[in-house]
Amino acid sequence: MKILMFGRGVISTLYGWALEKAGNEVDFYVRPGRAADFGSSVDVDIRDGRASSKGKPVQENWPITLREDLEPDHDYDLIIVSVNHDQLDSAVDFLQPRVGGATILIFNNVWADPAAAISRLPREQVAWGFPGGGGGFDVTTLHGGFAKSIFLGDIDGSSRTDRHRVVRELFTKAGFSISDIADFRSWLWFHFILDAGIMVGWLRMGSFDALVRSRPALKEVVRLVREMIPVLTAKGGTSRLGAAAAKYIPASIFGFAMQKLLTGDNLYTFIMTQAQNTGRNDYKSQADYPRDVLADARRLGVTVPRLEANEPAFR
Ligand SMILES: NC(=O)C1=CN([C@@H]2O[C@H](COP(=O)(O)OP(=O)(O)OC[C@H]3O[C@@H](n4cnc5c(N)ncnc54)[C@H](OP(=O)(O)O)[C@@H]3O)[C@@H](O)[C@H]2O)C=CC1
Ligand SMILES: CC(C)(CO)C(=O)C(=O)O
């Protein structure tokens, strides 16, 4: 398959690498003028979780093809978009006249209504997913990894299309397993409020390491997430699965489970540590999550006193 990764960010490089190694043709679209900065190869120092649960270490200099333009009659089969949630509008603007025959896989955090966010694209050409990996760039080297599983979801019937099936097959053939999510809108929003809670804790404690070492700070994250669930429902989402767990399981038990996961000898802890150590999450990218949730809470008239009390940490 001929695949264009939109941007040469962390997620696009991780999954571009995996998909090219699986026999696909992979290029990267970067902003005009950026190709020279990035150069014609990228150093990857990652863990590949398809091989084992802790991830097989991979270190190599990977030659890549960058392009700074995209003509409307291109022949890409798939364009994978994984940008920061506040960049999605500009990515859609760029792609709108250039979709051609490609399927567009949106593979990132979304806090807007997903259908509205992509309303300028042909809806039947859009598929939805989320990475099971992460990390960050330390100058020119990508540090991070990915798990065996990625998420693919349904938004308003999107998973019933042939295009969704083709994306599913692409990742499956590349050795990934798929977590299918029925109500992906709610899943994305719950993931976002989870990130918002973690980012408040991270900002307050000064580092991700300090957050995960502190049981009281993790309990506060759980209480924050619980408080934000009504924002998700006011936006039209349903609170199931993770949201129900955050709501009904006592904060102390949930905090304990989070600590076990986030400090254990596992790929998830490794990925978050790499994201932290490379500075992937600067102040702006951390503060954006709780700030955007608070803005919607205020717009929708949902009271979030705990989040408001923490506002000085992310204003
Ligand atoms: N990194 C991680 O650990 C994880 C990330 N995610 C999510 O995945 C998504 C992507 O994250 P990540 O890869 O880390 O982010 P990055 O910032 O590393 O990558 C985003 C890339 O998209 C490019 N881009 C954005 N808008 C445009 C545009 N209009 N034209 C051209 N290029 C554009 C950026 O270019 P430029 O630098 O020039 O702006 C950048 O290279 C986010 O939603 C994130 O929350 C999910 C799990 C883990
Ligand atoms: C891992 C994290 C919080 C930051 O890198 C992220 O972007 C995400 O989970 O969506």
Image: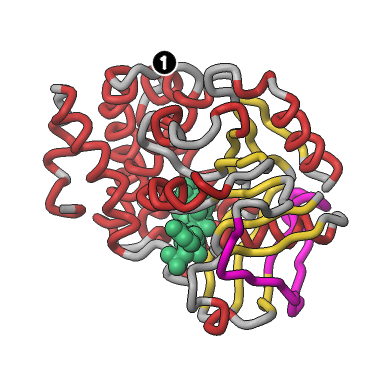
The front one of 295 and 242 is: 295
x, y percentage for residue 62? 75, 75
Number of other residues with Cα within 10 Å of mark 1, as a class: few under 14, some 14 to 19, many 20 or more: some
Residue at 53% across / 66% down in the picture?
A: 136
Mark 1 CB in 8 Å range of ligand 2? no
The front one of 191 and 32 is: 32
Q: Is residue 270 visible?
A: no
Q: What's the magenta region?
A: 46-71
x, y percentage for residue 117? 41, 35
Q: Is residue 48 left or right of residue 157?
A: right
Quadrant of res 248: top left
Q: Is residue 161 left or right of residue 221?
A: right
x, y percentage for residue 148? 74, 45
Quadrant of res 25: bottom right
Is residue 56 highlighted in magenta? yes
Residue that label 1 marks: 238
x, y percentage for residue 210? 37, 59
The front one of 229 and 259 is: 229
Residue at 72% across / 51% down in the picture?
A: 76
For the residue labelled by badge 1, is the local secondary structure a helix, a strand or a loop? loop
| Residue type of the residue flagged with mark 1 | Thr
Q: Is residue 148 left or right of residue 99?
A: right
Residue at 73% across / 52% down in the picture?
A: 75
Q: Is residue 26 left or right of residue 230?
A: right
The front one of 67 and 6 is: 67
- Residue that sits furthest to the front in the current view: 73
Q: Is residue 241 visible?
A: yes
Identify the colour scheme used: secondary structure
Is residue 216 highlighted in magenta? no
Give the vertical position of 61 relative to 313 (above or below): below
Residue at 39% across / 30% down in the picture?
A: 116
